[in-house]
Amino acid sequence: MTGDEQRPEGQALQDSVADAYALNWVDRYAPPDLRPYLRLSRADRPIGTWLLLLPCWWGVFLGASAHPDTAGWLTLWIFIGCGIGAVLMRGAGCTWNDITDRDIDDKVARTRSRPIPSGAVTSRQAAIWMGVQAAVAALILFTFNWAAIGLGLLSLGLVAIYPFAKRFTWWPQIFLGLAFNWGALLAWTAQTGALGLPAVFLYLAGICWTLFYDTIYAHQDREDDELIGVKSTARLFGDATETWLRGFLIATVVLMSLAVIYALAPLANPLKMSIGLAGAWAMGAHMNWQLGKLDIDDTQTCLRLFRSNRDAGLLAALFLATTIFL
């Protein structure tokens, strides 16, 4: 079913989505007519919003720390604006993903309960909802400087391409990483007025982190993906997954450490730099804990570890935020 066809008589609409949090606020409190649209936006699964938002916060915090003259109300607004923008753009991106995947999602157990394959909304309704979310996000973007606005507009190409990546490459997680971590570049630029090398290192660190957590996530669908011919790093790595993930872990820590060094070394403040580096290593320690718990054949464990990456990214963000005040 594409989502535009009429449901067979007697087929009930799903009242929840398979991989949503139990007793989430959408299922419990949202008006029934609004629930399918909130589910399109993954409002019942906030982890993706966190994973999109955290690189933005890394960028604004490190930028404010490296350029103390820019820290203040601007930093606060970028912090808040990125939070609102992450909710909206993650929602728009997920809606686009569901539109493009409507003929795949109904063949995968975990995704066939989503609004379009379940028949709760049509593809046309979803497209309108996507446009509304993107338009409101644009209003926030246009409050930033012109360089940041340009970066924000460039990111739309990555968002558009990502849903198709799993059809033509074994590395769709790279395309997700390119899109999901763009906020590190944008927020640094919004804070400092220009793109800098530390932001590029943060961006690359985020891409390696995405390869880490989204490979874990993709192991939930490994068997279904094989049946329908969808590619992923989970299928590519197979039993060698832990080795690859350890490599991504090391790359994440090294690249984030380089971002901190290049940003903060000119300030000649050893305490500030030490705390920034501690954030990178704390995040790495959390990722290493995940590897110790990983069982690629246990879907519930994979989902739990994937969700725990909010805490991994928050560790880095909290340490970087602390450096602003030193």
Image (tube, rainbow, N blue to C red):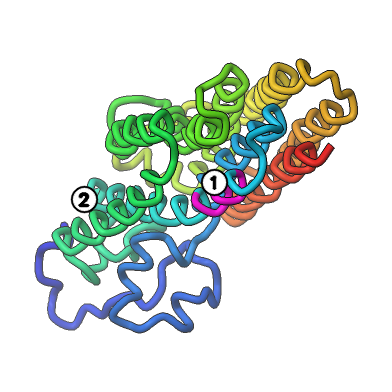
Asked if residue 128 lies left or right of residue 50, the reply is left
Q: Residues within 10 Å of mark 2 (few under 14, many from 20)?
A: some
The residue wearing badge 1 is 78
As helix, strand or loop, the secondary structure at mark 2 comes to: helix
As helix, strand or loop, the secondary structure at mark 1 comes to: helix
Q: Which mark is residue 103?
A: 2
Q: How many marks?
A: 2
What is the quadrant of the C terminus in the image? top right
Name the one closer to the observer, 43 or 53. 53
x, y percent for residue 109: 38, 58
Residue occupying the far right of the picture? 271
Asked if residue 298 lies left or right of residue 127, the reply is right
Please give the range of residues in magenta: 75-81
Q: Amino acid at mark 1?
A: Ile
Instruction: Specify the principal SS of the magenta part.
Output: helix
Q: Is residue 291 magenta?
A: no
- The residue located at (75%, 19%) in the rendering is 261
x, y percent for residue 82: 51, 48
Name the one closer to the observer, 236 or 4. 4
